[in-house]
Image: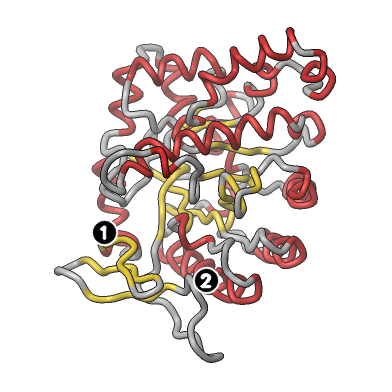
Amino acid sequence: MTSAESERSWKKLGGCRCGVDIHAHVVPARFPAYLKGPAPKGWPAMAEAQPCHRHVVIDGRTYRTVSDRCWDVPKRLADMEEMGLSLQAISAMPELMSYWMNAADADELLRYVNDQIAVMVAESGGRLVGLGALPLQDMDRALAALERLMCDPGFVGVQVGSNVNGRPIGAPDFDPFFAVAEELGAAVFVHAVRPCGQERLVGPGQLQQVLAYPGDVGLAAASVICSNLVLRRPRLRIAFSHGGGTLGLLLPRLEEGRRVFPALQESIEASPTEQARHLFYDALVYDEPTLQHLVRLFGETQVMIGTDYPFNFHERRPVARIEAAFADEALRVRLLRDNAATFLGRLSEVSP
């Protein structure tokens, strides 16, 4: 995208020089009752909590207590103003992706969740765009859902898990999905879900988000590199949450391993670091020096805002974080908006 094209694209968003957030979540205000008999394991429900909050109840236990900002569009838009955001890509709370559920039931639930995302997008006046969810445990259903979503101009792509029932997203099983995503121009955002290694954590359950998520995202990104996905799908736009997790620390080991082990040199067809610079990453690392390192490592065109809004563990000052980390105005503009516009790809179709 040239600078003139970027400016024209941005003016379609109202001329604002604020940020574009590619990592924000949705929980519907309520879930439909399961009408085919006893609810399957994993089917969610809502229960009232304190004012402006509800409990997400799964299998009779509170999974998470969430605020009404998960579904209340006016409150979300007000918060976006305070955070310096002009546009936000919204996706389901990761646990709702339901890969562990019977595929037909998951498909039914995700249709409902995607419909709720579509309603929020329609109510936002062009300030929200959708990243839908797919039942990736069943490829036929997932591809049908992807094609359906990409026919809706309110959606720019999909969110997928770092793994699907233990299979990393870079595994060959998922190549049919990536082939269609590339063909349809769908942005693919990879978020940690049910990460490995949780049994090694010592402390409260919230450490899953704090420590285990980045590990699983790093392994997911490494699986994409080791499978040469971007070499086979050069037009695919795929982004990783939490700054790519641990990938930045794994890349030097992959480079050295590829130099030392002939089997790795044969299987990994191009430099892991060069492949990594064709992926996108959010800036959700909560630290300016780490953010500066990500930009040096992955490139000035590959990093963009991600907040994890509206959960408690989210970036509350995304624009200020980038401004504190980088003095160069052109670089700031890329990180705040232009890289996200490239990744999302369909902003002109959803802008007012």
**Which quadrant holds the N terminus?**
top right
Q: Identify residue for label 1.
A: 75
Q: Position of residue 297 (x, y in %)?
A: 54, 15
Amino acid type indicated by mark 1 = Lys
Q: Are marks 2 and 1 in contact (CB under 8 Å)?
A: no
Give the residue number, with chain letter if any, for mark 2. 115
Element at badge 1?
helix
Q: Residue at x 81, y 24 (%)?
A: 267
Is residue 54 placed above or below 216 in the rendered structure? below
Which residue occupies 74% across, 52% down? Answer: 177
Residue at horizontal 15%, vertical 69%?
51
Q: Residues within 10 Å of mark 2 (few under 14, many from 20)?
A: some
Residue 339 placement: quadrant:
top right
Position in image of residue 90 (x %, y %) = 46, 53
Can you tell which of label 2 and label 1 is closer to the viewer?
Answer: 2
Would residue 172 be visible to someone looking at this image? yes
Residue 303 left/right relative to 124: right
Mark 2 and mark 1: span between their CA atoms? 20 Å
Q: Is residue 225 above or below residue 289?
A: below
Q: Nearer the viewer, residue 256 or 129?
A: 256
Query: Which percent across, then down, holds residue 83?
Result: 28, 40
Q: Amino acid at mark 2?
A: Asp
Question: Residue 284 appears at what percent x and percent y?
Answer: 39, 33
Q: Nearer the viewer, residue 57 or 129?
A: 57
Q: Foreground: 229 or 103?
A: 103
Q: How is the image coloured?
A: secondary structure
Q: Residue at x 57, y 60 (%)?
A: 133
Say which quarter of the image contains residue 252. top right
